[in-house]
Image: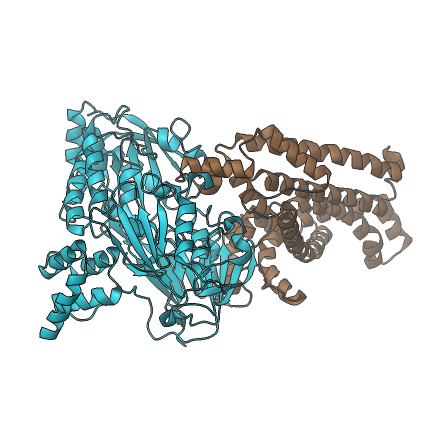
Chain colours: A cyan, B brown
Amino acid sequence: MDETQRRVDEIRKQRSELENHLIDEYAAGKITRAEFIRRGTVVGMSIPLVSFIAAACGGGGGGTAAGTTGGGGKPKAGGTIRTGIIAPAASLDPIKVADEGGLAVLGQSGEYLNWSDSKLHLQPRLAESWSPNDDGSVWTFKIRQGVKFNDGTPMTAKDVAATIDTHADPANGSNALSVFTGVLSKGNTKAVDDSTVEVTLDAPNGNFPYLVSSDNYNLIILPAGFDMASWDKSFLGTGPWKLEKYTPNQGVSYVKNPNYWDTNRQPLPDRSEVKFYKDEQARVLAIQGGQVDVVSNFSVAGGKALLTDPSINVIEIRASQHREMHMRTDQDPFTDKRVRQAVALLIDRQALVQGLFEGKADLGNDSPFAPVFPSTDTSVAQREQDVDKAKQLLAEAGKGSGFQIELRTWNGFEIPQLAQLVQDALKQANISVKLNITDPGTYYGDAVFGKSPWLDSTFGITDYGHRGVPNVFLTAPLTSKGPWNSAHFKNPTYDGLVADYVAALDVDAQKQVAKKIEELLLDETPIVFPYFYFHLAAEKNTFTGAEPTGMGHIDVSQAGSTG
Amino acid sequence: MGRFLLKRFVVAIVTLWLLSVIVFVSAQILPGDVGRRILGPFAAPQAVAALNKQLGTDRSIFVQYGDWMGGVIHGDLGKSLSQNQPVGHLVWDGLKNSAKLAAVAFILVVPLGIFGGVVAALNEGRFLDRLISVSGLSAIAIPEFVSAIVVILVFSLWFGLLPVTAQAPPGAGFFTVLKYLILPALPLVLVLFGYIARMARAGTIEALDADYTRTAVLKGLPRRTVIRRHVLRNALLPTIAVVATQTGYLIGGLVVIELIFNYQGIGQLIFRAAQQKDFPLLESGVLIVGVVYLVATLLADVAYSLLNPRIRYASAE
């Protein structure tokens, strides 16, 4: 133990103040091992280092920072693995990709600075490590040396800086702008030397490494000056796979990338076929019928058959994907927060999670803090159904005899069923809900205030995909100037708390702010967050090792047949 | 014949142009712009604006239509806005796939339908007639997505006889492609069998009642010869009309079947183009389906007149 202690001391001398603070917190038992590993990787400690300190200071054995994989047995090398994914919605241009199908393809031959795995840990990939300055406004990434693209050209720090800068430049119209706006501006990412990239942010941001990880799926690293629109000709990247053949609308086949740098993660299969399925039913049938070995995504509603099929292993990942039911705080009847609270109290969340997801979802507590986020303060009491309280609140607000309201949403996922269940729930207090369910194009409209039922309706349900950190959920739909603020919620206290949360560098500080935000939102209730549902993927039970993420990536490089 | 064809050609061109205008107008009713459709509701406004500029969809829609029309006149269908591929390519691939599926469906259903119709007519009013008519009608009423799931469950998942998806692997031979297409063709057979059998039945009954049949019977020809030479030939005529009108449905109208069987037909292509407001792809896809439809009806008219000496193009003028 003396030797271990000496080595820990040695390590601590070389780490930043922030990192040492984290080690102190962990040693003092203030954060769990999982949180320590996660935060450690965020502030730039390598996985082996974090694991060593975790073992040395925590004394606990076992456990690993790496993502787990489903199934039993060891995967065998060789052969072809076939994966069914959602068909990409548009052209495979890393600038434009804005959908799960597209990102799943980008992630096969492309690679990110780091990989946000199924447990929301950051795994270093093209960045070996990263660290912030004292207030988190400048982040420095150490870029892995000796990495080559799958066409043989070397990858350098210049390429990394150029890729990030391309996505931060408004003129290029990158889909990543929705993440970078207000965080990172054009021209502020620089290659300091051959192995160092320095990013100067618009404001301090404790979670920035997540924003250049696989969570920001457009950000696969490509050569400086690369023509993004031509990406679908080459599928260039530094990842484990190299393009064999791309058939638009049908799928992609890959062979191993002979230049792949990671000696520990060389692809097990010789080939990989990624097949596109536009329809969930077709995807589910494809794995049942043996046309694919893995499917990257299915829902409880559309894939019930897989949940009970003994020949299928279901891979379950807790995620932050959810629905938001907004109530316009500036329009009758929701100007009174008691009415908003009443609506939230009428809903039986347990029943929703059972009925819509067969229990495969976490309960929402009317804030974006999903239980899966380590910074969520789970000590804040869960809001439960309470019809009497709801009726009382409505009476106090002068709405004791109920009212009529239109609920707008669109026809996809489990949303129409959710809308009906909300309609039933609100009947308990004589609130008569008229459903107006349209196609997504109509619901989202032009996606700007004044021209979008999503942003203009008094009462509506919107779908949100998974994010590795709650930053976007906290800002865009809820801050006064948020571009997705359907509830028209304007609360300076809230805006201030969110700014504090974003700037907070360690999980303790984040959690303290999170508690305040959670309590404020429970009181104000501009939006009902009924649940956060799990990401489900599936593999044939003769296969193992496929690694999906909540985002929709699917890594099959370490997967194979067990038989 | 030459004048007849020329006249049909002129009418066809006008029809197609009107079709393109209708599609153009209805596409304008769909809310949102192309950049927003491609990048989704959560993309930053600058990103949407930049993409629209890049695609040329920030220009007036009339300029875009003129642009596209100018290209079409020169034989260029333009470039898909959402897929970054030449439209001609996409539409041609989709059309080929749709034609294959339609062909398999027709090959299965036409002989079956005619046989069923003739058998029903010969047993008019009896049990066999009722059975064929009622089952044909019931089959029409079953939605394709129901029958598709049933045939998949039975033939793929339970018995493992046929593949679940319709798309054969690249480079597959004729029989492999056929094997992949049988399952998706079955729901179409169910839908079309009733139509064809009914038309064939009506045609046969009419022919059986006709004077020439009575004459043939009175001449002393054996029943089998009468049916083959006189009845069957006349019973075929209305069937051809059904086949021609259903071509438009089989090519371009099979969105549900194509989705369930994950088949890259032209129906799916047009459906997605409409969702994404991919104007050149939408216009071109609809136009091509229109051409197929017009050609099919023209062929049907020609075949009709060849089979039926009473109708001549000369008299049609």
Task: Please count the marks in the image.
Answer: 0
Q: Seen in the image, is B181 located left or right of residue A41?
A: right
A555 or A199, nearer to the observer:
A199
Q: Quadrant of the C terminus of chain A?
A: bottom left
Dividing the picture into quarters, in which one does residue A37 lie?
bottom left
Residue at 72% over, 33% down: B15
- Residue A473 left/right relative to B252: left
Q: Quadrant of the N terminus of chain A?
A: bottom left
Horizontal and vertical percent for residue A91? 52, 48
User: In the image as oriented, which residue stretches furthest toward the front?
Assistant: A193
| Vertical arrangement, residue A457 with respect to residue A260, above or below | above
Viewer can see residue A292: no
Q: Can you name the residue that lies furthest to the right here?
A: B219
Q: At x 61% / y 60%, what residue is drawn?
A: B182
Name the foreground residue: A541 vs A26.
A26
Image vertical order of residue B161 relative to residue B258, above or below: below
x then y, percent, for residue A313: 36, 65
Determine which quarter of the picture holds residue A411: top left
Could you tell me if residue A28 is visible in this image? yes
Judge by depth and name the residue closer to the eye, A178 or B180.
A178
Residue A479: quarter of image: top left
